[in-house]
Amino acid sequence: MAFQSSGLSKVKDSFTQKIFLGNEPNAELIAILTVYFVQGILGLSRLAVSFFLKDELLLSPVEVSALLGIVFLPWMIKPVFGFISDGLPIFGYRRRPYLILSGVLGTASWMSLATIVHTSWAATLAIALSSLSVAMSDVIVDSLVVERARGESQAKAGSLQSLCWGASAIGGLITAYFSGLLLQYFTTRTVFGITALFPLIVSGVAWLIAESPVSQDTNETNQTNPLPIKHQLKQLRQAITQKTIWLPTAFVFIWQATPNAESAFFYFSTNELHFEPEFLGRVNLVTSFASLAGVWIFQRFLKSIPFRVIFAWSTVLSSLLGMTTLLLVTHTNRLLGIDDHWFSLGDSLILTVMGKIAFMQVMVLAARLCPSGVEATLFALLMSVFNSAGTVSQALGALLTYWLGITSTNFESLWLLVVITNLSTLLPLPFINWLPAAEKQTETPKDGEQAFLPDLMSELVLREPESKIVE
């Protein structure tokens, strides 16, 4: 019996280390991972939304870019959800009720798209509400991850973030191909109806969150009690006024805010290259695999690489590889004997891996900045900077698309849009020194400096004014 017990213990330990990266697989962790998993599964509707806007509402590339910028707004105001969650508990709970509400809101928004939405304004509102649902649940699970990440040892640094984003990637992987395959046989509205089922899973697993009513913890530390709004604002002001925080945050904003050509390229892929939804589902499948690979590569090989090195190399290589899209938009790949489909798949795979590696670095740094009691608020504030930059990117892309006269049928200037958007990704490089230097990355703060930050932040936040942390 002792031998059998020892064997089971070894199997359990091995399972915990290899599957959960050393994190104890309790009910709350399963709930957290399930929320991230559902976020990945919601990619099922991605292609349906694009085709719905293009074919049923007859919107132009410029209009789609503008609409996507609007529906991304909930991700820009994530700090508001953080304030509400940290400072306004429902029936004494700060996390669980908000997860339940987010799931209900998500289901309602997708059901409206499946049934009653027939105009661009109604579509914008419905998609924005679905975005609000995911943003709200993301704030809650991010705060739970931050609370756990604060207790990680140096050896496990970043493991929980990698695990969470891995769960999201797996969810996206499962539904990636089906996002296109379903459109071959069903309408976009049917796909929206199927998607509406998944947010309810978030409402269900919310009951697994281990949380005590704050009214019963009045004698405990502020880690379980909500802080007064005034105190939250004071801590946030202390954080965001430090150069060790806002300089690298500004760098990441510039890095993410450069214009993109995604909407115009979608129209080119479907109207010019005549890619079918089923093939675009394959592309999503490849990018989901690539996203998961990026998480694994970061966790296995790159989590100790200096920030400047990660961002510099990923920026330069992404810009160079992005230029290969010129071969596709000018049909030069055909002269080289490379089919449009294969060319598109390979390009998506490489760029996605590099993008995920850079983003994982951002996530780990952001999580380490959050003081106890305002985890949701500060982390959401940092991430909203990243998301706001995404909205700026969409707006600049729409503006360039309009100036260049690119429409749903005219792609003569698409090559120029590709050149401009790829060269613009190099703009952050002159500011690379805003990120922490390698030799300063493990220094500890001076006594009394940044005392409100978690202890482990000493590994990531530097003492000197010219150094900083990224988000």
Image (cartoon, grey):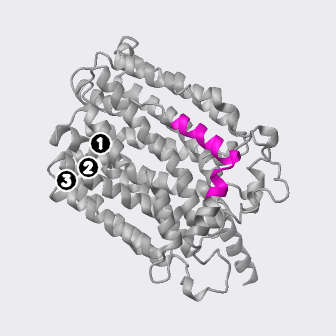
Q: Is residue 118 left or right of residue 50?
A: left
Q: Which residue appears at 81% of the width and 53% of the height?
A: 445
Of residue 76 and residue 112, the one placed in the foreground of this image is 76
SS for callout 2: helix
As drawn, the label of residue 433 is: none
Asked if the residue under mark 3 is in contact with the one under mark 2, i.e. CB atoms within 8 Å, the reply is no
Seen at 41% across and 41% down, the residue is 391
Dot 2: within a 10 Å radius of its alpha carbon, few (fewer than 14), some, or many (20 or more) residues? some
Place residue 18 in its image quadrant.
Answer: bottom right
Percent of width and height locating residue 216:
58, 88
Q: Residue at coordinates 29% horizontally, 25% vertically from top-left? A: 402
Mark 2, residue position: 124
Instruction: In this rendered view, identify the residue nearer to me: 349 or 403.
Output: 403
Position of 430 relative to 296 (above/below): above
The dominant secondary structure in magenta is helix
Residue behind mark 3: 189
Which segment did they paint magenta? 237-256
